[in-house]
Image: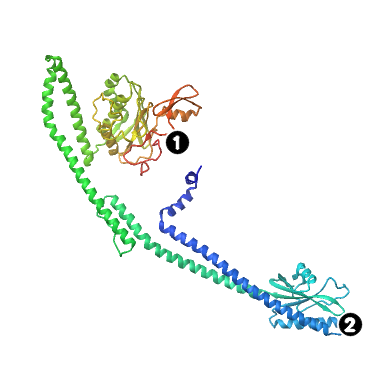
């Protein structure tokens, strides 16, 4: 499964609230540009802010460490010099000397107490000799980590580390501990520690952090405002172009875009206006041509009425007197009568088509029970079905199938569908099904004749279209019946759809709203008949094996032994589908379902 299929599947299964949130993102270029600018600005500000904060913090700590090492080194040297210059050997005198030295070292921190002094006994000094001292008893000895003490004792040089200064009051602050060793005559090796609180540096870093945060927020807002103004300058002409294009599509051909300046957007507006002018000119020319053609067809149809009436009168006289003619003249009179009937039907259909083209067709709706109309149509088509050897069955609901429709037009649609089914049914059974729902009524005419090849279901409603030009008509049709039936269905606000497959017959489905003018959402009947080979294969799901291939499909035999025909796989392995929508509106448009079965 590739990425496109995964995205398509995710778009179907994601929650409704997520689709609702993503809809403005998909539909608004302005929102996408704004959010993208804000997100990128926040990322840039975060990266730069962290970098600057890290640099400032590193600089402050480096300066503090350097100053602390210098001060600790100077103090240690001074203390060692004082210890070396003493001649005291009494423990009490040495303790007094240690206190004086530690107090003198602590006074170097100033009145603010910038550092604390601790003098701790080294592990090498016997426990009986205790000369430890400190400048402030607020700092606990646990502030000095064991690792630092080990490093100070092991190496004859300064060692330092960051620590948490713990005070006897329970307060803890970050600090810096610098340690070194001093030798006291008569007492041995001791550890001298300078403890520097980093509260001032911490306050400075917090101030810098707040400053960077405030500056970052202001910078993001400024960038968002700039992006909003720039995007508005670009998006506004695009929206105007979209709105103008929509008005042009609605038929307001005089709409144009305003041209301001000489930049790229101005050139775009000029090109759009030129395109709109050319389209309007072409559309008007096509409208004029179509108007002339419709008038020509209407005028010719009307003008032919008079000579046709005269010819009809003469033909009727000849037809009634054919028994007195020789066989050749008799046959000529019969052919003349037949072709005149067909000519009259063609003229009637052409007049009806011209009315549809001119938008002059009107609907005269009334309450009609579709079951009664189907029975009348089948009674009228019974002689034709008998001649063709077809049996016509019905599946009618028990309750009335009442619909608000024009009975004359509805009768014409059903008559076309039934006659076509008999014509192309190859003498096999035909089924007419009527179904009712709360909003719609549907009629499906199913035959088991030659069927439709893939793509032909979209062509059967074209004017004068024939699936097989070599196939002769036996009912004298004009080639306009299904086209007029489609227009009648559109006039009712309904659907006329076709399904077919070669060798499996075809089915035409007419769906009408029960109340004229109401939108259609679903049809009570499926477009694909449940007895089709494809439906049986999907329903059974049984294993099959291939047999001899046919022209447009492969014959398969189900495990039950029933033969069927399924589509031949295409180049990509997918199966061709002969099921096609033919409706008054495009599939997926408002009020038209996008499912393949239309319901």
In depth, the one of 542 and 67 nearer the eye is: 67
Position of residue 583 measured from the top left corner of the image (x, y, whole percent): 33, 38
Residue at left offset 34%, top offset 61%? 264
The correct choice, above or below, for 594 with respect to 117 in the image is above
Residue at left offset 28%, top offset 19%? 387
Q: Earlier in the sequence, mark 1 or mark 2?
A: 2
- What distance separates the C-alpha of mark 1 from that of mark 2? 105 Å
Residue at left offset 21%, top offset 40%? 360
Depth-wise, is mark 1 or mark 2 nearer the camera?
1
The correct choice, above or below, for 104 with respect to 277 in the image is below
Occupied quadrant, residue 196: bottom right
Going by the image, does 210 lie left or right of 399? right
Is residue 406 shown to the viewer in this render? no
Occupied quadrant, residue 134: bottom right
Position of residue 207 measured from the top left corner of the image (x, y, whole percent): 58, 73
The correct choice, above or below, for 116 with respect to 299 in the image is below
Position of residue 210 measured from the top left corner of the image (x, y, whole percent): 56, 71
The coloring applied to the image is rainbow
Q: Quadrant of the C terminus?
A: top left
Residue at left offset 26%, top offset 25%? 473
Q: Mark 2 sits on what residue?
A: 90
Position of residue 447 measured from the top left corner of the image (x, y, whole percent): 35, 26
In depth, the one of 78 and 133 nearer the eye is: 78
In depth, the one of 174 and 2 nearer the eye is: 2
Q: Mark 1 sits on what residue?
A: 574
Specify few, some or many for label 1: CA neighbours under 10 Å numbering under 14, 14-19, or 20 or more.
few
Occupied quadrant, residue 141: bottom right
């Amino acid at each position: 499964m590739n990425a496109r299929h995964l995205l398509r599947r995710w778009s179907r299964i994601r929650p409704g609230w997520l689709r609702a949130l993503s809809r403005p993102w998909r539909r608004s270029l302005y929102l996408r540009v704004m959010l993208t600018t804000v997100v990128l600005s926040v990322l840039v500000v975060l990266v730069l802010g962290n970098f600057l904060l890290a640099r400032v913090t590193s600089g402050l700590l480096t300066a503090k460490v350097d100053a602390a090492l210098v001060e600790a080194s100077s103090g240690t040297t001074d203390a060692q010099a004082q210890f070396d210059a003493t001649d005291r050997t009494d423990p009490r005198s040495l303790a007094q000397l240690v206190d004086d030295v530690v107090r003198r070292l602590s006074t170097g921190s100033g009145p603010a107490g910038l550092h604390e002094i601790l003098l701790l006994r080294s592990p090498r000094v016997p426990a009986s000799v205790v000369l430890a001292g400190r400048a402030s008893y607020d700092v606990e000895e646990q502030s000095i980590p064991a690792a630092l003490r080990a490093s100070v004792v092991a190496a004859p040089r300064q060692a330092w580390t960051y620590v948490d200064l713990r005070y006897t009051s329970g307060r803890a602050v970050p600090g810096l501990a610098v340690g070194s060793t001093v030798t006291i005559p008569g007492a041995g090796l001791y550890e001298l520690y300078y403890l520097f609180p980093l509260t001032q540096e911490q306050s400075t870093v917090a101030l810098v952090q707040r400053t960077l945060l405030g500056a970052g927020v202001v910078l993001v807002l400024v960038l968002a405002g700039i992006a909003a103004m720039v995007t508005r300058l670009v998006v506004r002409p695009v929206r105007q172009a979209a709105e103008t294009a929509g008005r042009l599509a609605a038929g307001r051909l005089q709409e144009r875009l305003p041209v301001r300046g000489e930049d790229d957007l101005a050139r775009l507006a000029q090109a759009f206006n030129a395109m709109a002018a050319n389209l309007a000119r072409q559309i008007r020319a096509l409208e004029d041509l179509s108007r002339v053609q419709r008038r020509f067809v209407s005028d010719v149809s009307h003008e032919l009425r008079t000579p046709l009436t005269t010819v009809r009168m003469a033909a009727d006289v000849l037809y009634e007197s054919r028994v007195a003619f020789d066989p050749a003249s008799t046959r000529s009179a019969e052919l003349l009568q037949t072709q005149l009937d067909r000519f009259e039907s063609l003229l009637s259909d052409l007049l009806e088509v011209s009315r549809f083209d001119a938008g002059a067709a009107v609907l005269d709706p009334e309450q009609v029970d579709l079951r009664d109309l189907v029975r009348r149509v089948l009674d009228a088509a019974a002689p034709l079905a008998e001649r063709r050897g077809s049996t016509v069955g019905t599946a009618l609901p028990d309750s009335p199938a009442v619909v608000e429709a024009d009975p004359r037009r509805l009768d014409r649609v059903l008559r076309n569908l039934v006659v076509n089914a008999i014509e192309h049914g190859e003498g096999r059974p035909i089924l007419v099904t009527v179904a009712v729902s709360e909003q719609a009524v549907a009629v499906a005419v199913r035959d088991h004749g030659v069927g439709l090849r893939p793509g032909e279901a979209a062509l059967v409603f074209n004017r004068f279209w024939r699936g097989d030009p070599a196939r002769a008509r036996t009912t004298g049709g004009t080639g306009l019946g299904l086209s007029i039936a489609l227009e009648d269905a559109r006039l009712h606000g309904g659907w006329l759809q076709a399904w077919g497959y070669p060798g499996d017959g075809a089915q035409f489905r007419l769906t009408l709203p029960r109340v004229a003018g109401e939108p259609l959402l679903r049809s009570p009947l499926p477009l694909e008949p449940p007895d089709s080979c494809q439906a049986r294969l999907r329903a059974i799901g049984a294993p099959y094996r291939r047999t001899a291939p046919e022209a447009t499909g492969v014959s398969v035999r189900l495990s039950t032994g029933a033969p069927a025909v399924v589509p031949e796989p295409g180049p990509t392995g997918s199966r061709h589908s002969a099921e096609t929508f033919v409706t008054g509106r495009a599939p997926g448009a408002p009020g038209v379902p996008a499912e393949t079965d239309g319901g």
